[in-house]
Amino acid sequence: MQVVIIGAGIVGVTLARALSRQGAKVTVLDAGGVAGGATGRSFGWINASFYADASHFALRAAGIEAYRRLCRDLDLPVQWSGCLCWEEEGAALEAQAQDLQELGYNAEIVSRADMAWMEPAVAAPEQAVFFRGEAAVEAEAFTRALLGRSDVQVMTGARVEGIKTTAGRVSGVRMTGGVLPADRVIVAAGTGSPDLLAPLGVSLPLLPRPGVIFTTAAVAPVLNHVCVAPIGEFRQLPDGRILMPTAVAHQADEATQVADRLDVLAEAACARLQAILPRIDLHWQRVAMAHRPVPQDGLPVVGACGPQGLFTAVMHSGITLAPVVAEILTANVMGKDSELAALIAPYRPERFQSAIS
Ligand SMILES: Cc1cc2nc3c(=O)[nH]c(=O)nc-3n(C[C@H](O)[C@H](O)[C@H](O)COP(=O)(O)OP(=O)(O)OC[C@H]3O[C@@H](n4cnc5c(N)ncnc54)[C@H](O)[C@@H]3O)c2cc1C
């Protein structure tokens, strides 16, 4: 079976690896480069503590488990650091921990003294919640590493102009120079996905959700966890730089446009970070913006759609979700059963289809 995947972000590449391991002949096409979209500018936090409802929580928790399976097989740039979260305080923080505990999540309240021991460089809050099972991934390096270990063909600088159908089935993708034949086409093109799907009668409305993220110059190792504070989320990369989205609570950030010049945003966020890490001398060095692929209802869109042989996988929190979605969608594409299939039942593309025709 010849499968063409449009998009070499983390979603397209994890799928490509999973499909090739099931015997499919896979080609990945990207208009830019590998991880050149949202993936390469993500915060890289793998978590289920941010969730919309019980189904979304279950999918995210399964996402963490899927990373564990991948990390058992391969040496990948994932740090199983856990996360310390003190975005809320007092009763709200206790309620957050309790809600997650009731869902079976490892969420433990830690005191100021514990915090001071766990993160000595941070101006410690009264309490925090420790999510022991959470992790962080260097998403671009991870995507490249997976690709390097996969038996798939990749074409970069290869924009797909359209998807060809013959007698109601996908038969290839149109690109400069001609049509590349395919038995199955998977649109994993992030914010480029709606334009590819619309001509086939498939509606996938996305919200405008730009995200801005910066890194500081490298400092000595000072942070041990993903930290989620009222001033924003931050973590230290293995090379010493500290990474932080400029928006507070970036996962729930609903800004539809970038509020200021990128350097102004980075300066302001770095000043907030400096206040919470008083003993470290911080300077921001790189700032970048990317459009997050956020479907209209904020939830993933995964599964078959439109003509026979067409599938899509588009989502925010794609870093957390890519490996589990790859496992489930691979079974779908190959016509096999997956014991995880029920996890994506709420996220089929059908829910947006009344918007067209
Ligand atoms: C600032 C920021 C912080 C984030 N933090 C987190 C986080 O902590 N945890 C988390 O889980 N998620 C996070 N996310 C979200 C996450 O990064 C995305 O959900 C994920 O990267 C989506 O991956 P993707 O492969 O679907 O899309 P992308 O990485 O955007 O890849 C899509 C690819 O498709 C290609 N493409 C588009 N159109 C075409 C075409 N016509 N032909 C060929 N190629 C095409 C593009 O060139 C691109 O490379 C964050 C995002 C941002 C911006």
Image: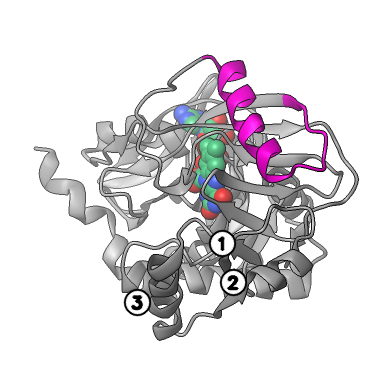
Would you say residue 11 is visible in this rendering?
A: no
Q: Please provide the residue range marked out in magenta.
A: 261-285
Tag 2's secondary structure?
strand
The answer to which of 310 and 347 lies nearer the viewer is 347
Q: Is residue 20 above or below residue 197?
A: below
Q: Which mark is residue 194?
A: none
State left or right for residue 346 relative to residue 314. Answer: left
Tag 3: amino acid: Ala
**Does mark 1 have its CB less than 8 Å from ligand 1?**
no
Question: Which residue sits at x=31%, y=37%?
Answer: 206
Question: Which residue sits at x=26%, y=43%?
Answer: 296
- Specify which label sits upstream in the sequence, 3 or 2: 2
- Specify which label sits upstream in the sequence, 1 or 3: 1
Q: Is residue 138 above or below residue 35?
A: below
The answer to which of 52 and 155 lies nearer the viewer is 52
Residue that mark 2 sits on: 131
Residue that mark 3 sits on: 342
Quadrant holding the C terminus: top left
